[in-house]
Image: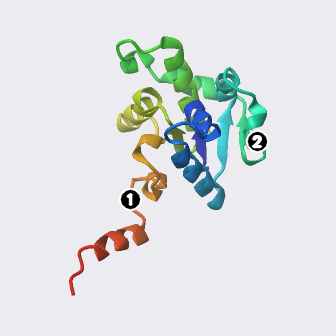
Amino acid sequence: MRNAVQLDTSFLITLADPRRDRHGTAKQFFQQFLKERMPMAVSAIVVAEFCRRQELGTLPLEQLMLVPFNHEDAVIAAGFDFKDLKADGADRQALKDDLKIIGQAHARNFGFVITDDAATMFRYCESLRKAGRTHLRGIKLQDGFSLEALTDNGQRDFPVVMEAAAEYLTE
C-alpha cells in the first residue's frame, strides 16, 4: 500500500488548530488525501502523543486508519540506528518515537510520512531514505501544498508543468 500516508502528531495538531501557521496547508493535504482516496494512517504512538494536548475525538476519526504498533514495526524501527541521527540537543525520547513511527510506516509499505516537524521527523525520514534504509518520502508542511510532494520521485504534475510553461510563451 505505497500510496498510503502516515500522519505525524505535528501534522494532526496543525490540522486540528486553525490558529497554527500552516493549518491551511495541512487542510489542503488532508482534502487531497480524501479526494485521492489515499489511506491515512495514525499510529498508536501518534495517538498517545496527540492525546497529551487534546482529545482524540476532535479528529475526523471516520477518515483515519488507526494502526497498532506491533512487533514487526518494532523490529524495523530497531534497525534504524538512532545514534547516527541524533542532533545536538535533540530529545532522545522524541527521536525514538519518530523512528518508531517511520519504522511502522516502512513495515506497512506506506509511501509517505507527513509532518509539521521539519527539524526532526522530516529530517530523520529523509536521511533514512537518502541512505537507502527506507522508501518513505517525507512531506513537510513548511514547503506548502504541492501535488509533487505526493509523487514517489517529486516529479511535478503535468498540468502544473504546463501552467508554468505558459508563463514563458510569447506572442
Say which quarter of the image contains residue 44: top right
Query: Where 132 sits versus 47, above or below?
Result: below
Q: Position of residue 75 (x, y in %)?
A: 59, 24
Q: Are marks 1 and 2 in contact (CB under 8 Å)?
A: no
Return the residue nearer the eye: 54 or 37.
54
Q: Is residue 2 visible?
A: no
What amino acid does circle 1 point to?
A: Gln
Per the rendering, the mark at residue 155 is 1
Decide if residue 13 is on the left or right side of residue 164: right
Q: Is residue 40 visible?
A: yes
Say which quarter of the image contains residue 109: top right
Q: Position of residue 69 (x, y in %)?
A: 68, 27
Per the rendering, the mark at residue 61 is 2
Q: Residue at (40%, 45%) from the top-left corner?
A: 143
> How many tags in the picture?
2
Q: Secondary structure at mark 1?
A: loop
Q: Quadrant of the C terminus?
A: bottom left
Return the residue nearer the eye: 120 or 3.
120
Q: Secondary structure at mark 2?
A: helix
User: Which class describes the residues within 10 Å of circle 2: few (<14), some (14-19), or many (20+)?
Assistant: few
Q: Residue at (55%, 27%) from the top-left corner?
A: 76
